Image (cartoon, helix red, strand yellow):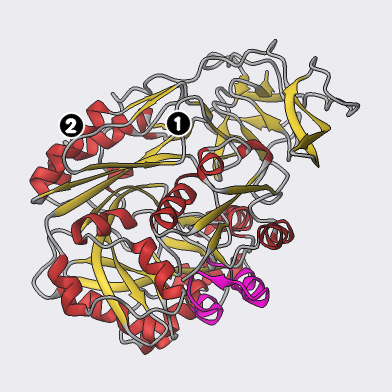
Amino acid sequence: MLQKILIANRGEIAVRVIRAAREMGIATVAVYSELDRNALHVRLADEAYALGGQSAAESYLNTEAILDAIRQSGADAVHPGYGFFSENADFARAIIDLGVTWIGPPPEAIDEMGDKVSSRLAAERGGAPIVPGTTEFAQGPDEIRDFGNSNGWPVCIKAAFGGGGRGMKVVQSAAEVDDAMASAQREAKSFFGRDEVYVERYLTWPRHVEVQIVGDQQGDCVWVSTRDCSAQRRHQKLIEEAPAPGLPDGVEEAMGEAAVKAAKAVGYYNAGTVEFIYQDGEFFFLEMNTRLQVEHPVTEVITGIDLVEWQIRVAAGEPLPMTQEQVRARQDGHAIEIRINAEDPAGGKFLPSPGPITKLVAPDGFGVRFDSGYESGDEISQFYDNLVGKLIVWGKNRDVAIRRTIRALDELVVEGVATTIPADLAILRHDDFVAVEHSTKWVEQVLDLSGVGAGPVAPPADEDAEPLVERATTVEVNGKRFAVKMWVPETVGVAAAPAKAKKKRSGGAGGGATAGSGQVAVPMQGTIVKVLVEVGQAVTAGQGVVVLEAMKMENQINADKDGTIAEIKVSPGDTVGGGDVVVVID
């Protein structure tokens, strides 16, 4: 069995792996960025190593820093979690080349299934029908326009490496292709480190149904459950449930068998998810996520199977502990997972809401589980994903699970940031959701969130608060000398290390601007990735002026009135705060 696992991730999934490993008697190693130096996963791990930097690219996507942490800690295994390097074959090979166990699929399978283009070909080999689309990377906007003109609009541009809706753009017409492709590539590069994209037909009213599979190194593979993930916004999931409800007889089994065949076609082992689009009794292979999914707990609670434990055991060379028949016999009841994201759902906009969590109280009771990487006092950073936590609820049937989930959401307290809880409740209480008549487009096209409030949000930052700075000193413990770094208020003198200057935010003064004032302000903290206008340019109300990235999502900030651009206060790469004025319109 493995002795020490380094988790190359952060937040909720790092906490999840640390807890599973601890229950198995395995030591754990956390890694952290400058912003995460006191995060929950760091506090829980047996050891923790600094990666440096703030953004994902500077820290959790810094291969050399992670490899150095592996060497220093002596870890004999690495769990990648999800996101970041979890579907990066080159990173997996680097781990294996160190002589360290990779808790994931073989790099060759990541290459083939992690690339959404070649995975479509593998699915065809396994007998799964695929959505019409390209089988090579898109070489430019003209190629996507040609596909749309031939197959009909809308089409979907998708990141070839990655998942979770990141780097995915729906394009309604040929005129939108250039901007959509550039945006998809920026998001893909930011989140997955690669910017290749491809295009496929966009179905009009589909459900998103996926299959959890686990394979071992002996060649066996089982499917554990289906999950429905159709309640989405911006192609990112809000609510997941297992098993997928409302499928005609035989469809669930057919999906499971197709998923196993697709996995075996590439020699897959460890945990993975095969995703399908379901519409009008037919299902089509969508993609395979070569990692553990965010929504894996709903599969766990209806089967009693710890998927992270299975991952660790399979990586250590053990065979699967159950046959397909035994796995199916374990299924009991229905489970629902609610992703609690730091977003303001008011008006259906789902604007990111970074900031400190002033109070977090998880619900409890029979059949209720809460997975989170945060506690009261922790902060949701604009540089990372905005998942506060996951509420997972079990019921003896779907109706009970829905009622119990509503009760648990009513008890859940998250203060300091806006969250998606009001939208989650609106979904659960809607007749369409109860009747399983929703689709992946239902939240954005049908669900009325005009009356949904933001809930409590973070108070304005104290501009006079003294910043923390890094200082170095040496200490002696039991006669052994250690060089240490400390983060202390700027006025505290510890050693002769120069204080770091507080970074000045770009943009104008905070506080926002009134509608139609011409003082165009950003609604949340983030980074400017593109300026869409020039000084002297005429604009109309609603026209985009800048693109803001916050929590790995791009948001277009629009003009609030007709007029002429008088001043542009930001440039690409600038960091801005909520309420900062970025463009002035006369």
Quarter of the image where one finds residue 482: top right
151 is higher (above) or lower (below) than 302 = below
Q: Amino acid at mark 1?
A: Glu
x%, y% of residue 523?
54, 26
Point 83% across, 27% down: residue = 500
Query: What stretch of residues is rendered in magenta?
Result: 86-112
Residue closest to the eye, 365 or 462: 365
x%, y% of residue 466?
72, 15
Query: Magenta span has 108?
Result: yes
Residue carrying label 1 = 375
Residue carrying label 2 = 407
Does the rendering let one see residue 208? yes
Quarter occupied by the C terminus: top right
x%, y% of residue 197?
56, 66
Query: Magenta span has 203?
Result: no
Image position of 125 (left or right of 409): right
Q: CA distance from mark 2 to mark 1?
A: 21 Å
Of the residues under marks 2 and 1, which one precedes in the sequence?
Answer: 1
Quarter of the image where one finds residue 548: top right
